[in-house]
Image (cartoon, rainbow, N blue to C red):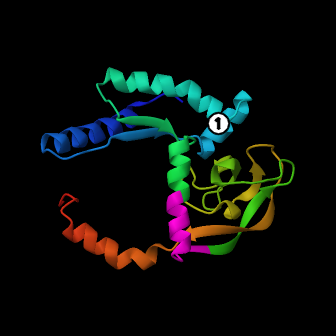
């Protein structure tokens, strides 16, 4: 959808950092993309009867006009569906998998039997398991602020079809971040790239 003040604040902060780095003589590539994969985008596109890619193509021009109005200019502006993003994601994933850093694990998720699809947290609504407030999404409660798993909702319903979801196992792949903990901690402390608090 449209850019709101919170979005613009994030981009202005990044733009300030990029300008500062360039003033210091550093080479910077300022890149941005519209996300065609997120749950809210998928839901909105379904409501509009179009694909997420079509929806993002329509709002991309609006976003770029808004950024230009604040003198924010990206070196590259794409979508998560761009060829460049796909190729780079496949390259990174392939190298991580070949190195043994991608681990498979079976998890249990809610599944919409009418739409034949797994339901991520924002695709499920139900009663909050903490405060019992109705019509809450599957990740957090707007009434009490509690966070939880979609499987903890009371009387969950698919936000897509209204059907009662069933539990179903599926295999997921995870990046083995703990294998990089020592390296990352050393980089954060010693690289000079992170500003001290």
Which one is in front, 91 or 109?
91
Does 3 sit above or below residue 129? above
Which residue is depicted at the point 50% across and 74% down? 176
Q: Quadrant of the N terminus?
A: top right
Does 30 sit above or below residue 133? above
> Is residue 177 in view?
yes
Residue 81: quarter of image: top right
Q: Residue furthest right?
A: 114
What is the x, y in percent for residue 31? 38, 41
What is the x, y in percent for residue 39? 62, 45
- Disc 1 is placed on an element classified as helix
Would you say residue 100 sits in the magenta stretch? yes
* Left or right: 111 as drawn, with respect to 180: right
Mark 1 closeness class: few <14, some 14–19, many ≥20 residues within 10 Å: many
Q: Quadrant of the C terminus?
A: bottom left
Residue 104: quarter of image: bottom right
* Left or right: 21 as drawn, with respect to 86: left
> Is residue 143 in view?
no
Which residue is depicted at the point 75% across and 60% down? 110
Does 76 sit above or below residue 189? above
Does 158 sit above or below residue 9? below
Which residue is depicted at the point 86% across and 54% down? 113
What is the x, y in percent for residue 106? 70, 73
Which one is in front, 114 or 131?
114
Which one is in front, 73 or 136?
73
* Residue that numbered label 1 is attached to: 52
| Dominant secondary structure of the residues highlighted in magenta in the image | helix
Which residue is depicted at the point 67% across and 39% down? 43
**Which range is magenta?**
91-103
Would you say residue 95 sits in the magenta stretch? yes
What is the x, y in percent for residue 168? 79, 66
């Amino acid at each position: 959808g449209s850019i709101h003040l919170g979005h613009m604040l994030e981009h202005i902060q990044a733009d300030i950092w990029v300008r500062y780095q360039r003033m210091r003589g550093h080479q910077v590539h300022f890149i941005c993309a519209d996300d065609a994969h997120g749950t809210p985008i998928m839901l909105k596109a379904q409501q509009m009867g179009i694909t997420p890619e079509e929806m993002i193509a329509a709002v991309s021009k609006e976003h770029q006009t808004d950024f230009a109005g604040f003198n924010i200019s990206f070196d590259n502006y794409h979508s998560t569906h761009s060829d460049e993003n796909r190729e780079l994601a496949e390259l990174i994933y392939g190298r991580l998998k070949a190195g043994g850093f991608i681990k498979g694990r079976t998890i249990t998720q809610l599944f919409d039997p009418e739409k034949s699809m797994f339901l991520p947290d924002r695709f499920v609504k139900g009663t909050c398991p903490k405060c019992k407030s109705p019509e809450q999404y599957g990740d957090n409660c707007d009434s009490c602020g509690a966070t939880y798993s979609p499987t903890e909702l009371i009387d969950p319903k698919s936000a897509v079809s209204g059907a009662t979801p069933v539990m179903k196992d599926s295999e997921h792949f995870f990046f083995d971040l703990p294998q990089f903990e020592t390296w990352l901690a050393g980089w954060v402390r010693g690289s000079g790239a992170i500003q001290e608090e």
